[in-house]
Structures are given as structure tokens and as C-alpha cells.
Image: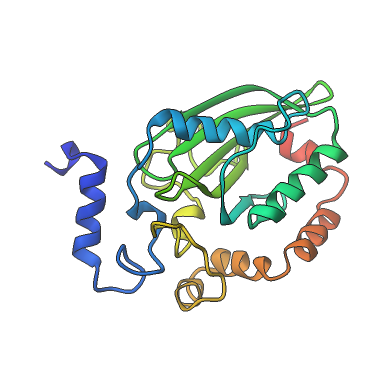
Amino acid sequence: MSDHLPAFLLALGACANDASEPGTCEDSGALSTCLAPSQDDAHYVDQAERYFDTLDASADPESEPDYAETVARWEWPPWLLLTGWGKDFTLAADEIILAAFPGTTVPSRDCRAFDTQPFARCRVNFDYDGAPCPIYEEFSFNNGGLVTFVEAWSDQPGLLPMDGDADPWAEGTDVHRLSTRVPGLGTASGLIDPTGEAMATAAADDAELADFAARTQDFWGYWLAAYEEAGDDLFARGCGW
């Protein structure tokens, strides 16, 4: 019977059942899956499109997504892990990336809305001076419709969080993503507190989450170190060239 219930009723039921436990829907460490969509599908797709506009030299430079103050971006290997932290740093990082690769465009985009977090998911192709780079990317949101978490993978065999053929939009139960494990993303504001008690508790049993929290404390330092460690073949590995 539960298979036929609307997503928001399932979310409310989960919250009601677990409200007394730390890290559930009534707690400051609530997970993103506690939230149901608060906007229409077009809003989530538009925000995802605006995100790619910030990385597309041919797009309107005024087109930016509406980021939450503690928005984070996590790009799985071979990319550089935490490549955005906080609204201002994330926008600044994207300006640096576009300046370093001024011919970059994102001409091929397929963005869709979903009724469970992440509410927007995209399969796109970046174009680096004629060389295509396929990427799968997801976007989580708070109740105000602001982007709270961006997560990206190379759309290459062995690098996606799901079977790209059997589950092209990562709707299965075995998808390996970070966004649904970050405490705080399930609150109305989607606030992430990387040094808070909820994060410390969750990170104690999750090495990837612990790494994420550590990187937020020295965003630029970790990002530079990751870039230097990536080597000259970063794009060859990430884009399949």
C-alpha cells in the first residue's frame, strides 16, 4: 500500500515515526530525504539550468542559481571532492574555473525534477574547446527552494553512483551519494553545521562524511591540494578522453 502513497506523505510518516531520535526529521541534524518538494518541477529544473549557466561561457553571466548560505558542492573522484562551500565561495570558485577554461560551454543538458531528494538531477555534456565531458549531477534544495547541495560524478563506466543503463536517474535504493547523509539538509533551511554535534555523531561512522566536514574548515587549502594531486591527466580520466 505504501507504494501508492504520495512522496510527501511517506516523508511525513518517516518523520513522525522517528522524531524522538537524534538526526531524524524533527532534529537539527535531519537528512535531506525528510523534505518533500515545496516548489513546482519547473523551479528545480530552472535552478539546475542556472547552475550550468555559471560554468558556460556562452550563457547569460547574470544567470545564477539561488544558493543557500551553506551550500556545498561535492565532486567525486577523479574530480576534486569539495569544490564549493558557502554561497560566496562557490560562486567565486566557479568564476575561477570559467576564467581558467574560458571556452567552456555546456551545450547538452537534460535536467529533470524528482519528488524525492535530490529534487533536480541532470545528465550533461561540458564542452572544453570541442572535447566533450559527460557529467551526472544532482541538486538538493531546502523548503525555500534554495540549492543546498550539489553533487557530481563523471558519466563514465565505474564512476557513477548507480548503474547508468539500468537506473539512469539514480532512483534505486542502492545509489551511493553523499547528499542524503549530510546532517542538517533535511531541516527547512537546509543549514549544514560541519562542526556541530549532529555532524560529529554521523561522521564517526562515515569516513566520507568526516572527510567532507574536515574540508569545509579549509576550503581553499584542500581544493588547491586536490588540484595539485590530481595530475595532468585529470580531464583525460574524468572525461574519458
Query: With 158 as the anchor, is 97 left or right in this view?
Result: right
Q: Residue 215 location, x and y as percent? A: 67, 66
Residue located 82% across and 54% down the image: 227
Look at the image and tell me in which quarter the C terminus lies: top right
Look at the image and tell me in which quarter the N terminus lies: top left
Q: Is residue 49 above or below residue 14?
A: above
In the foreground, 225 or 172: 225
Residue located 75% across and 40% down the image: 237
The answer to which quarter of the image holds residue 54 is top right
Residue located 17% across and 36% down the image: 4
Q: Is residue 70 above or below residue 65?
A: below
Q: Is residue 17 above or below residue 174?
A: below
In the foreground, 55 or 61: 61
Q: Is residue 19 above or below residue 138?
A: below
Q: Residue 181 location, x and y as percent? A: 45, 60
Query: With 110 as the anchor, is 236 left or right in this view?
Result: right
Q: Residue 118 location, x and y as percent? A: 44, 44
Residue 89 in view of the camera: yes
Query: With 38 as the anchor, is 217 left or right in this view?
Result: right
In the foreground, 239 or 202: 202
Residue 156 in view of the camera: no
Residue located 84% across and 27% down the image: 103
Colour pattern of the rendering: rainbow
